[in-house]
Image (tube, helix red, strand yellow):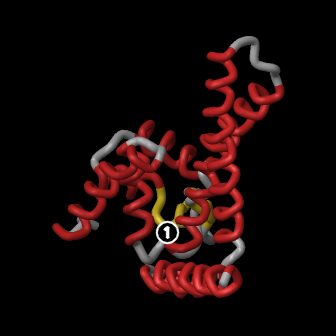
Amino acid sequence: MQLSEKSQAFVLHFGEMGSRWGFNRTVGQILALLVINQHPLHAEQIMQQLGISRGNVSMGLKELQSWRLVKLSHQAGQRREFYTAAGSIWDMAKTVFEERSKREVDPTLSLLRSNLLEQPDNEEDQFTQQKMKEIHDLLELITQWSNTLNSFSPEQLQQLMKMGSGLNKLLELKDKIVGNKGTAASE
């Protein structure tokens, strides 16, 4: 089974994007291939379609399993292991955000918390600690927002994203109302 030109372009591009999302090019290509296939694939099919070694396929699939982005299955009468993308595109996006948070944000927050518990020795340390506190507070806010988003269903997330600029208009309206009330109260 050979990939169409469009499918091949998608898989190659997804591989390049993989490095920006936290995994290497080959892992990105394997994930893309699994996403666009209706049926589960075994390692040999992945090797053939991507033109990569068995070792690269094996390591890539292990990486994707550690990210919880692929599911392993077996088929009756087959000794091979088959792989599919884990869930919908929305489910996988949520999983990537969760995993990136665990791998990147959580350790940073831990380091910042530890450093913020120490008393600064001098003015320079005090300034540094203030900047670390600002970063900590921002990351905490992002984490809270992310946790809230992760509790939403895909339909709710789509609705929220479609609101887009409407949220900005709502905030501007709130500012006008609060501003007007503040002005009226002071008069």
Q: Residue at x 48, y 45 (%)?
A: 22
Residue 151, x across and y down, in percent: 71, 73
Q: Which image quadrant for residue 33?
A: bottom left
Q: Residues within 10 Å of mark 1 (few under 14, many from 20)?
A: some
Q: Is residue 28 left or right of residue 2?
A: right
Residue tagged by mark 1? 40
* Image quadrant in which you'd find residue 122: top right
Name the residue nearer the viewer: 38 or 116: 116
Figure quadrant of residue 187? bottom right
Q: Is residue 133 above or below residue 156?
A: above
Front residue (pair 169, 88): 169
User: x%, y% of residue 141?
Assistant: 67, 56
In this rendering, is residue 31 above or below 125?
Answer: below
For the point 68% across and 47% down, the residue is 137
Tell me if 2 is positioned left or right of 66 in this view. Answer: left
Image x and y of residue 68, in percent? 62, 56
Q: Amino acid at mark 1?
A: Pro
Quadrant where the N terminus sits is bottom left
Asked if residue 44 lies left or right of residue 112, the reply is left
Q: Nearer the viewer, residue 5 or 107?
A: 107
Coordinates of residue 6 in the picture (x, y in percent): 20, 70
Q: Is residue 135 above or below residue 3?
A: above
Q: Is residue 139 left or right of residue 46?
A: right
